[in-house]
Amino acid sequence: MKQTILKVNNLCKSYFMNKTELKVLDSVSFSLEKAESIAITGPSGSGKSTLMGLCAGLDNPDSGEIILCDQDINSMNEDERALLRLSQTSFIFQSFHLMPTLTALENVMVPLELQNNANKETKERALELLSKVGLKERQHHFPSQLSGGEQQRVAIARAFINQPKILFADEPTGNLDSHTASKIQDLLFELNQQLSTSLIIVTHDNDLAAKANRTLKMKAGQISE
Amino acid sequence: MIQFISNLFNPWTWIMAKREWHSQKKHLKLYLLCISIGIAALVSIHSLASSVRSSIDLQSRSLLGSDLSLKSRFKMDEAWLLEIEKKMGPSLAERRFAGMAKFLNSKQAPRLVQVRAISQGYPIYGEIKTTPLGGSELLQGKHCLVESSLLMQYKAKVGDKIQLGQSTFTIAAQIESLPGESGVLSELAPRILIPFQDIESTGLISFGSRVQYLEHYAFPEDIKQQELIGEIKAQAEMKSIRVETSMSRQERVRRLSTNLFSFLNFSAILALTLGAIGVGSAIHVYINKQLKSAAILKCMGAKKSQIFAVYILQIFLLGIIGSSLGVCLGIAIQLILPQAIQAFIPFEIQSQVNASSIILGLLAGTLITLLSSLPSLKKITLLNPLQGLRPETIQQNSSRGFNFIFYPICIISTLLLTTLSSHNTKTGIYSGITLIIIIFCLAVCAKVFLSIIRKTPISFMPFTFRQGLKNLFRPNNQTHTLIISLGTGVFVIALLFLLRENLLYQVRKTTQDTNPNFVLFDIQHDQSQDLKALLKKAQVPILQEVPIIDLRLRKVNGLEIKKIIQNNSSLPKEERIPHWTLSRTYRCTYQEQILDSEKLILGDFIGSFDGDFEQERIPVSIESGMMEKLKVKIGDTVDFELSGIELPCVITSVREVEWMQMRPNFFFVFPSGPLNEAPQMQVIVSRSEDPKSTNKLQTEINNQFPNISFLDLTLVIQTLTSLLDKLSIAIRFMAGFSILTGFVILISTLKLSQDQRQKESILLKILGASKKQTQLILLSEFTFLAIISTNVGCLIAYIINHLIGTFIFENSPPIQLSILLISNVALIIITLIIGLINSKKIFSSPSLEILRD
Ligand SMILES: Nc1ncnc2c1ncn2[C@@H]1O[C@H](COP(=O)(O)OP(=O)(O)O)[C@@H](O)[C@H]1O
Ligand SMILES: [Mg+2]
């Protein structure tokens, strides 16, 4: 039986710069099943990041509907959304965005700490994930002491620690060399398989896009398969 | 170097500087504030000090009220006075003595006052300011002038009557100021001026009363002043008469104001140093933000010296503008400052703008800005472009070689600054060193605190608190600087309050429990029995009864005093015997036992002597401090004189006196016997149960024995408290500057690290943190900051206060935790408010904008 994790209907979003309207998303619709992976490609500035942000409830759309894990995001307040993010979703960025004040291990543990259910097992889980991404030895290092690829692997470990139903990855390999990039890709899909997490990946990398079940192309705020 | 200078004047440099400046406009305001507050403190104090100095010079003659005054504890030799009169012209006589003033319209008990009987025509220069106007002209026919504090206390007004001794006076006016005297101490023994011819009628001067005899002179036109002054001084010295001239008074007032100002100046420099720390840290963050653009410029081929010029220019302009603002602010403050210190300054201050203060302010501000930006500038020049693109990877530890040069430069310029801004080099250097030590202690203390916190396992705390604490250690943080600057502010304020409490504690201790709370003096021998009967009836115990006899020193170890004074002049300063110990009047007593408040430390105390002192020396006991000053030891001889009779004595014991105890204490104590029949006065020390009975007793004694003075120690404590309050207004004003600077630094650092904090918050939000959690993290960060700063500051304040208590008062004060508590709460609240206002933007930004690359 298929289970829909994310459903987007007629999503519109515009930014206003000096009273001139910039239409970033123009009636975008698509849906994502459980354990399915989607790649979104498209030229820079076509609205990919905006779409991702809206799907994760980080911003409000002008119109349209987003159903994330059977819940309508638009009708939720900030804290309800935060809770939803905490329990069901994860994010990976092009430029990693780790907390500079925390060690690798601590960074991985943050989502569980925020849920207030950090305990001994949490740490073990975090270590397990770190060793899965091959960074167990670097657990006490700070982000500034890690290379870009290493930071991104920590970010991936962080993304999976709360066993999300859906993972948003915005150009996760954009800042990395091709060798590291392919390792990261493998990691993403491996975890996607193991934990049946749905993936939604923005990328310019054709290899990566090919690995996904489906590819959506974005152009000038509109989406096509 | 030349290349650098030519770069400095290159238009490109100016354009680049302007662009970067423009992009940081909002933050620049705060740096300017930091530097200008410090400079304002410095300029206002410096310029006030020179206003005071020039006021002293302008008003020099009226500071004394005459050209030359003689002052003595004894009636002066008539023949000698006549001789002086021949040279100087007639004198105006004055007498000062203690008395109890009773306000006839008031039910309150009488109180101890200083009565001054002055002749018509005094002061010769300047005036006695009164309300209503009139001054000394009003002193005619049983009228008197009264200190305003007295009128206030008794709710009396002009026209009311006062009883002084056996005579009644009508209040003609209230005294506003007396020539050359500050109002501060007047509260302890408020002054009442009466006409000279009315002394007799009060009956307050009789044998044995403590009277000061003064004669005031004006210089005649055609006279060699210096010669005459020298001659009079030489003769007066032999007679133990003090000579004061308008010049020496001017010198004294100048010294007083210098002392006051070296203190205020110290606080100003403290504020300025804090400002420097603030500017340093602000510039550090500022430059860190520009590192990326500097790196990009470098990548594009800009030369080191070109980039350096762009930043030096910005910082230089910052320094100039900041210090100009500070100078303006300082001048404005200078106009209101006199009110804070007028109580201590015995003349009117004419505020004026002073060029040297302005130059000092500009110089100091620019210098400090440049200096404090050196470490950050160094970073720019050493920057390799690749690092610059990822600024967080640049290590903070600066090279050792640089530190070897940088810190000495800092120390030297601090000393230079303190020396330039204070009036004499010694205080300048001392205050500079003290300052460096204080800041150093705070810095070390802050480091220790931080490293302890960093090492403490904190897993027991909720995540939000842990995260808040970890935020203090984010890369490129300014936590250490912030703690130093806030800590210094807290330190100054806390120390101020602690010292005040310490002083009051020391005094209060003396009147607690069974300790005496009033002293009766000027008791005539023949009044003693009746007085004791009265005290017995009132059921107050006599805690101590001591006879007092005034003696003069004649010889030490057989050497005449005159000889010793002569010898003194050929000795190096340390070996001299201080002049005042030789020429003073020694109030001595005789006792069978050693007094309660004293401790025998050497030799044997001999309680009675019935030998013939024409053949055998009288065994006396000396106080330990006086022993050192007179440079004598046990077995040495001293000869006293009592109205013409020689008293040969030998020192047989040494006592230690607790001077803080409010009891009569003596440098020399005689055995009972030789002095028992000599003319003497008595002092009785006693304790009454409560203020009401003290009041009643005071009135009774005053009615029956108008010449006996009653010193109420509770009143002394009250007076001291209000005195300390007055003093602390001036100090608090200055401490306020350092606190203010601390806050500006806090605001600016928070603002500067805002981006980082905002990024972190958004990130947490994306990871699913609720608004409350994000808020809690931020608030706990601020709270930890406040707690660390307060406790670092307080810790050092407590230590210093304790050291002062132990080594100066020889009595360590109890530890007052209330100040610690109050400062913790206050600083946490203030920090939280500042922090919250600062973070408002963090919560109001909804989009991913902040994380955009
Ligand atoms: N906060 C904003 N204000 C104005 N314009 C914005 C904002 N955020 C994004 N945009 C604009 O929306 C368009 C789409 O941006 P984005 O979703 O980041 O594109 P992509 O990720 O596909 O490169 C861009 O043209 C960008 O300039
Ligand atoms: Mg994008």
Image (cartoon, coloured by chain):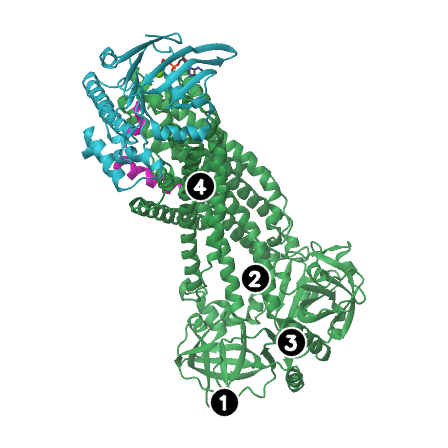
Q: Position of residue B849 (x, y in %)?
A: 41, 21
In the rendered structure, does residue B390 fall within the stretch colored magenta? yes
Give, as a single range, the part of the protein colored magenta: B388-417
Three-letter amino acid code at the position of disc 1: Glu
Q: Position of residue A14 (x, y in %)?
A: 46, 13
Q: Which mark is residue B614?
A: 1
Three-letter amino acid code at the position of disc 3: Ser
Q: Which structural element holds mark 2?
A: helix
Badge 4 and badge 2 both on one subunit: yes
Instruction: State how many labels appear.
Output: 4
**Alpha-carbon neighbours of circle 2 within 10 Å: few (<14), some, or many (≥20)?**
few
Residue B695 found in image quarter: bottom right
- Whether the residues at callouts 4 and 2 have beta carbons within 8 Å, the answer is no
Three-letter amino acid code at the position of disc 2: Gly
Left or right: where B164 falls relative to B38: right
In the rendered view, tell whether residue B345 sits above or below residue A98. below
- Whether the residues at callouts 1 and 3 have beta carbons within 8 Å, the answer is no
Q: Which residue is mark 2?
A: B230
- In depth, the one of A153 and B731 nearer the eye is A153
- Colour in which chain A is shown? cyan
Q: Which residue is mark 3?
A: B209
Q: Which mark is residue B274?
A: 4
- Where, quadrant-wise, is the N terminus of chain B in this rendering? top left
Q: Which chain is home to disc 4?
A: B
Badge 2 and badge 3 both on one subunit: yes
